[in-house]
Image (cartoon, rainbow, N blue to C red):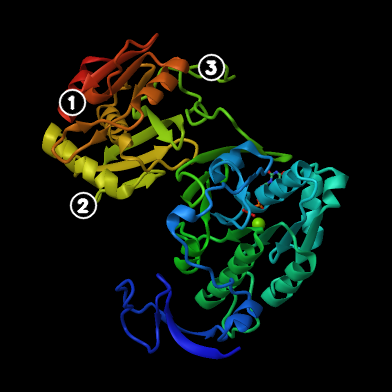
Amino acid sequence: MKKKSIFACRDCGHEHSKWLGRCEGCGEWNTLDETTTIEAPKGARGRLAAGFSVVSKMQPLSEVSLEDRPRLSMGMEELDRVLGGGMVAGGVVLLGGDPGIGKSTLLLQALAQHAEQSPQASLLYVSGEESAHQLAHRARRLGVPEALLARIQVLAETSLERINETLAALGPTMVVIDSIQTTLSEQLPSAPGSVAQVRECAAQLTRWAKSQGRCVFLVGHVTKEGAIAGPRVLEHMVDAVLYFEGDGHAAFRVVRAVKNRFGTVNELGVFAMTDRGLRGVSNPSALFLSHAHPTDADSEVPARRSVAGSCVLATQEGSRPLLVEVQALVDAAHIPNPRRLCVGLEPQRLAMLLAVLHRHAGVACFDQDVYLNVVGGIRVSEPAADLAILAAIMSSLRDRPLPERLVVFGELGLSGELRPSPRGQERLREAARLGFATALVPKANLPRREMEGLTVVGVSSLAEALDWLSAHR
Ligand code: TYD
Ligand code: MG
């Protein structure tokens, strides 16, 4: 195989034949690195030998078989849900997340559960980070039965060539590569984890999965900013990208699909980390409320009155409604540039909301520090969180708790109008089920029929919402 020197962009992966100051793909400056790639050999035989897929035949769209590829259950309901109903043969899934969040644990458990479900499956766990000894310890700790342990092959290896040999010899039906950043091809001179290495390794493993119809899980490291390390092209190559998120200290972790060619995105799988690995949580809607909340009927912590700066938001994640607590702390700033800090929410959105609050409700925060937090380490990115964020901010600013057992949602426009949120009925139904008494929502989300136990208040603008809040406590 012929080697060729090219210049690839660190961010978007766009390739250039010569060095340039600015990437022609994404327009970023100083992102080009010189790398070496392996040129695909000419001719069908050479391509096949290099693992490229067979040349496919053109056909009319109407004649393409509609038969669905069978779903392979991973034996973990929450993981199957995120994948869109299970894994698909030939599918490649990238799982990213902070160190220690539980990526290796999840995939080892998934392999074991899958082994139990499908007796013919042949499973391989390739670890470039941990030794076989460490893996065996973890598997024992997870309580995987001896019979299933015997069916999972482990390979502590980082060389792609050696991994390819094992894949060819064993022909596993499902493979975990832990992690793609530690895997390196000896054909390339660049260091493990570099753009060229990550891309080449992922490309070869993806080609193997597609041509053989086998499943591959790739573990991906994340950068400080929280994106999967390596070029964005990595995310384009695979069929699904899952992120493992959550506060490392909290017991609950969430797996979210940000891309999925086999199902819907933004579907959530919720897990609890226990001393025997991850356990799926099938009814998570009340998990992300702090114990201080009065609806927490069966918690051991005695229920307290609601506190200032806290507002419960009914959010919709994938197919399930979820109630999360948004907390705000607004405090006099002592520096000319007040601080804006968001955990689990988007900082740009906060800046916009504060501007709307100033312009349409006359409340200025330019001399106040604003801190926002979502309880439980979950990330909320939907705009339906707007009204809850401002309700929490106003509550903290005025040092006045919101009415008890209140739930809020709604998107704010730049002119201060409240826009309806999708699937409002489901959010309201879930809030009613969990014992909330009042819901403050956009007018267009008012239910057609009355809801048992839940008074729904519809408002059409921010000013109206704040008026209602100051009149009720
Ligand atoms: P790990 O799966 O090694 O994370 P990653 O591969 O994402 O870096 O994370 C394991 C963490 O979870 C570690 O801090 C120990 C903890 N843990 C448990 O609490 N219970 C268990 O049964 C296992 C296996 C790990
Ligand atoms: Mg790991």
Reply above or below: 29 against 177: below
Kind of residue at disc 2? Pro
Between residue 222 and residue 237, name the one nearer to us.
237
The Cα atoms of the two marked residues, 2 and 3, are separated by 41 Å
Question: Which is in the foreground here, disc 1 or disc 2?
Answer: 1
Q: Mark 3: few, some, or many residues within 10 Å (few <14, many ≥20)?
A: few
Mark 3 close to ligand 1, CB under 8 Å: no
Residue that mark 3 sits on: 302
Task: State left or right for residue 236 relative to residue 52.
Answer: left
Q: Mark 2: few, some, or many residues within 10 Å (few <14, many ≥20)?
A: few
Q: Residue at x 59, y 72 (%)?
A: 54
The Cα atoms of the two marked residues, 3 and 1, are separated by 36 Å
Mark nearer the N terminus (3 vs 1): 3
Mark nearer the N terminus (2 vs 3): 3
- Report ligand 2 position as a quadrant: bottom right
**Residue 469 in sight here:** no
Task: State left or right for residue 472 relative to residue 284.
Answer: left
Label 2: state its secondary structure. Answer: loop
Dots 1 and 2: beta carbons under 8 Å? no
Reply above or below: 311 against 108: above
- Residue 460, disc: 1
Dots 3 and 1: beta carbons under 8 Å? no
Q: Residue at x 33, y 22 (%)?
A: 401
The image quadrant of residue 404 is top left
The image quadrant of residue 198 is bottom right
The Cα atoms of the two marked residues, 1 and 2, are separated by 35 Å
Reply above or below: 183 against 152: below
Give how far across and how far down residue 398 sits, in percent.
25, 27
Residue that mark 2 sits on: 336
Kind of residue at disc 1? Ser
Mark nearer the N terminus (1 vs 2): 2
